Amino acid sequence: MTICEVLSLRYQWEEIVQDYKLDDYNGTIDNLTEFVESGVKGNRFRPNFKQATEIARQIVDYYGSMELLGRRLAR
């Protein structure tokens, strides 16, 4: 995945969750991880929840694979 694809997914996620119940709507890796782990609370019946979860999981998984390769993305 290229950085452009990651940024595009991040933008899509931020647009989907703008009306969700979240502490922070920025697509940082910490916020995406928190959403994957506990975003279901109060949001599972909101429009496009499944898509938002899939996007967040994709980005978090990609970030995790980069750490395994010894590359770190800035938090």
Image: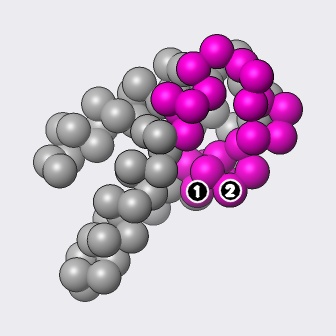
Residue 21 visible within the image: yes
Q: Residues within 10 Å of mark 2 (few under 14, many from 20)?
A: few
Tags 2 and 1 touching, CB below 8 Å: yes
Per the rendered image, the range of residues in magenta is 31-53
Question: x%, y% of residue 2?
Answer: 15, 48
Mark 2 residue type: Glu
The quadrant holding residue 43 is top right
The quadrant holding residue 10 is top left
Task: Say if 53 sits above or below 66 in the image.
Answer: above
Q: Is residue 22 magenta?
A: no
User: Which residue matches tag 2?
Assistant: 37
Mark 1 residue type: Thr
Q: Is residue 34 magenta?
A: yes
**Residue depicted at 22% across the width and 81% down the height:** 69
Question: x%, y% of residue 41?
Answer: 83, 40
Q: Is residue 65 left or right of residue 16?
A: left
**Residue depicted at 25% across the width and 84% down the height:** 70
**Secondary-structure class at tag 1:** helix
**Residue depicted at 84% across the width and 32% down the height:** 42
Q: Is residue 75 left or right of residue 50?
A: left
User: Which residue matches tag 1?
Assistant: 33
**Residue depicted at 43% across the width and 39% down the height:** 55
